[in-house]
Every structure is written in C-alpha cells, then in structure tokens.
Image (spheres, rainbow, N blue to C red):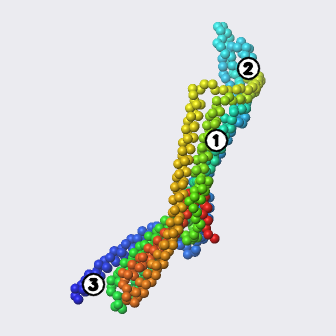
C-alpha cells in the first residue's frame, strides 16, 4: 500500500508539472494572440454581406481590374493609330533663311525660291532673308487594303486585351470566393473551438466534483485541466486564423480600409453539378485566355495580310499652298497632284517580314492547341474534385454525428462511474476532430465549385432555391 501511495504521489507531481507547462503555454499563446489584428468588438452587430455583394465590391475597387481597363483604353487608341493613314494629313510650315546671294540670282529666281550655284567673280553679293510659309496636304487614296488589314489587326488585338481583362476579372472573383469561404470556415472552426472549451470546462467541473466526494482520483482532475489547456490553445489559434482570414478577404476585395462587415454563412449551401463533357464544352466557348489567344491569331493573320499588300502600289494625292520671297508681301504659289509609289527592290525586307509574321502565327496556333489540352485537364480535375468534395460532406457529417453520440455515451459512463477520464477526453477530442473535418469538407466543396467556375470561364453553377 505504501508503494502504491508513493506511486500515486509521484504521478500527481508529474501531472502537476505537465499542467504548469500547459498553463505557461496558454499564457504565451494569449500574449501572442493579443498582438493579432482581431475584429473590433463594438457591441453592435455588423451588417452582413452576401458573396455576390463582396464580388461587386471587388469589381469596383480592385486595382488590377482598373489597370486592365486602362490597358483596354490604350488598345482602343492603337486602333485609331492604325486608322490614321486613311485620314487627311494637313501640315503648316514657316521658315526664315538668312542667306547671302547675288542680285542677279534674286532676279532669276524672282524672289520665289532659294538660289543655287556660286556667283562669278565681280558679282555683287547681298545678304537678305528668305521667307517660306504655307500649308501642305496629303491624302491616301488607295493601297490595296494594306491599311485596312492593319486596322483589323489592331481591332483583334483590342479584343484580345478585353479578353485578358475578363481573365483578370475571373481571377479576382475566384480570390474573393476563396477568401469568403475561408472566413466562413475559420469562423465555424472558431465556434468548434469555443464549444470544445465549454465542454472541457464542464468535464473539469465534473472531475473536480467527483474528486471532492472521493469517487475519482486527482489524476482525473489534472487530466481534465490539461485537456482544457489544450482546448484553450486551439481556441487562440482558431481566433487568430479567423482574423487572418478576414485580412485575406479584405486584400482580395481590393480595399484599404478595415473589413467593417460580417458575411452571410452559405458554407453549407448545396449546388448543382455538371458532367465533364458539358463543362468542357462551356470552357471552350467561354475561357477568356483561350478567346484572347484566338484574337491574337486573328490579329497576327491580319498583320500577315498587311505585309503582303506592301508588294502592291499605293496611290496618294498631295497639295500645298505657299508664300515665298525675300520681302513682304510674299509671292503665293500652289500645287496639287497625285503620286503612285511601288517598292521594286528592298533587299528582301518584306519577304523576311512576312516569313517572320507567319512563323509567329504558327507559334500562336501551337499555343492554342497546348492551352486547349490544359483547359481539358483543369476542367476534368475540377469536376472530379467537386464530386469527391460533395461525397465527403455526407461522410464527414455522419462521422460528426457518431462522434457526438460517442461523447454523450462517454459522459454518461463517467458520471455513473463506469467509464474513466481517458475515455471521456478521447471522445471529446474525437468530436472536435470530426466537427473540424466536417467544416473542412464544406469548405473544400465550396472552393472546388469556385475552381470549376473559374475553369469553365463563367459562374454557371447555380445555388438550389
């Protein structure tokens, strides 16, 4: 009996030591948690926003979308740059030349132009000013569609930039969805942690009560205390994860201020699902990165056409109205005419440019083929992940129900003296893990659906009414 008593005392000392260490860890964790940016509690309930409202906020505020919109504006202006050769070109000029020339040369030129040649010996030279002012005009009449092909190329490039903006938009929406559901998941996990602390506190009270009346050893009390300390540590971690999730969502929304609202909890909402073939068909029609690549191919093809038209002549009209002379009033003159320009030999420049453009077109075509294969892989994987996540919810929910029943049985057995504290704490840990697994299954399902929506290029997964 003495040996047993000594062993019990030694066991209690070790348990007390573990309890002291656990308490120290709780204190350190509390200090660390105090430094984390937790949501401000003003005592008033915050307004709640739906997922659609959060997406609308991101579409209005996210800087990457504003940059994409500016890129579209730049592409639109490049279309006008390509169209400018079709529009009239009008220039004004004014020049003053301080020159030395002979009187005879001035008479020969009539004061209407700068003389040429060197005066002979004995010629009287005179220094004077020569003025030249007026307007010149030019207009492209016909170039066999060279400029038109350049315009079409610029327009296709603009459509490609717009598709890139849509791709950026889809990426922003996916980030908001992931951040939204992450906040809901961490909020639920915080609720699980809070419930675990409440349950373990009740179990500690039960162990203390049974120990006071002499029906339970001190070991039950210290075990319950250690379990409660671990539960509080998990609670601190869950609270910090929730605060970090809110900050992550704020960043996904593209806002600088605090997140001054809560979220509508639709983590458990079921959604309709689709087959891989149906999803892939939609992806090939809607994926903005694929559409952008196709538009780039169109732009490159028009560029090839524009280069090929350089082999044909261009017809231009020109005209000017000028005032020239050494003294005012100046003499006026005008000219109007047309010209035909044809490049006969340019060292193979055009041929090389066409060959380069065709090679770049081949690169885009091969990239399209590779992208289609990647899209097929992404879509099929997303469909399979949605199916697996949907099935996991039912399994996890059943496991949580069984763990809750098991805890109720363990509590009843411990209260009647049939069970022990190890059985009770094990059942509590199992329930906590099962509840966390169920929340993780819901989160995985929602994020899998969001990934599928992103993979097919548009949100066609609708919520059940």
Q: Is residue 316 above or below residue 239?
A: above
Q: CA distance from mark 1 to mark 3?
A: 88 Å
Residue 27 tag number? none
Q: Is residue 266 above or below residue 14?
A: above
- Quarter placement of the C terminus: bottom right
Q: CA distance from mark 3 to mark 2?
A: 124 Å
Residue visible at 57% across and 54% down in the picture: 168
The residue where tag 1 is placed is 153
User: Which of these two is toward me, 306 or 28?
Assistant: 306
Residue 8 tag number? 3
Residue 104, quarter of picture: top right
Q: Nearer the viewer, mark 2 or mark 1?
A: 1
Of label 3 and label 2, which has the lower sequence position? 3
Q: Secondary structure at mark 3?
A: helix
**What is the count of numbered marks?**
3
Residue visible at 73% across and 14% down in the picture: 108
User: Which of these two is toward me, 63 or 158?
Assistant: 158
């Amino acid at each position: 009996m003495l040996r047993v008593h000594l062993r019990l005392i030694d066991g209690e000392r070790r348990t007390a030591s573990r309890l002291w260490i656990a308490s120290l860890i709780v204190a350190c964790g509390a200090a660390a948690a105090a430094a984390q940016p937790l949501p401000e509690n003003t005592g008033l309930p915050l307004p709640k926003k739906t997922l659609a409202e959060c997406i609308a906020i991101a579409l209005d505020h996210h800087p990457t979308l504003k940059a994409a919109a500016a890129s579209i504006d730049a592409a639109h202006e490049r279309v006008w740059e390509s169209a400018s050769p079709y529009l009239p070109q009008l220039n004004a000029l004014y020049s003053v030349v301080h020159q030395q020339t002979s009187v005879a040369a001035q008479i020969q030129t009539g004061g209407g132009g700068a003389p040429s040649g060197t005066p002979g010996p004995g010629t009287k030279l005179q220094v004077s000013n020569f003025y030249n002012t007026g307007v010149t005009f030019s207009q492209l009449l016909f170039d066999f569609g060279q400029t038109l092909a350049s315009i079409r190329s610029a327009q296709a490039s603009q459509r490609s930039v717009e598709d890139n903006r849509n791709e950026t938009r889809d990426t922003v929406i996916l980030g908001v969805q992931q951040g939204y559901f992450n906040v809901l998941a961490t909020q639920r996990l915080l609720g699980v942690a809070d419930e675990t602390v409440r349950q373990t506190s009740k179990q500690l009270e039960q162990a203390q009560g049974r120990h006071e009346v002499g029906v339970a050893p001190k070991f039950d009390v210290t075990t319950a205390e250690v379990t409660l300390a671990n539960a509080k540590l998990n609670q601190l971690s869950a609270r910090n994860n929730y605060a970090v999730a809110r900050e992550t969502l704020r960043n996904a929304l593209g806002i600088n201020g605090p997140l001054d609202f809560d979220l509508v909890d639709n983590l458990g909402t079921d959604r309709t699902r689709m087959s891989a073939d149906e999803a892939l068909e939609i992806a090939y029609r809607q994926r903005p990165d694929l559409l952008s690549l196709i538009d780039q191919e169109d732009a490159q093809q028009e560029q090839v056409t524009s280069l090929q038209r350089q082999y044909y002549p261009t017809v231009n009209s020109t005209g000017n109205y000028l005032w020239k002379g050494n003294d005012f009033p100046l003499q006026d003159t005008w000219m109007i005419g047309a010209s035909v320009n044809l490049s006969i030999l340019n060292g193979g420049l055009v041929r090389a440019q066409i060959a380069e453009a065709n090679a770049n077109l081949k690169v885009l075509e091969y990239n399209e083929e590779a992208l289609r294969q990647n899209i097929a892989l992404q879509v099929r994987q997303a469909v399979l992940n949605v199916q697996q996540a949907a099935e996991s919810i039912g399994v996890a929910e059943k496991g949580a129900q069984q763990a809750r029943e098991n805890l109720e049985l363990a509590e009843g057995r411990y209260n009647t003296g049939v069970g022990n504290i190890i059985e009770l704490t094990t059942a509590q840990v199992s329930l906590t893990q099962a509840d966390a697994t169920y929340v993780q299954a819901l989160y995985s399902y929602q994020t899998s659906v969001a990934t599928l929506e992103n993979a097919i290029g548009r949100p066609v997964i609708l919520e059940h009414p």
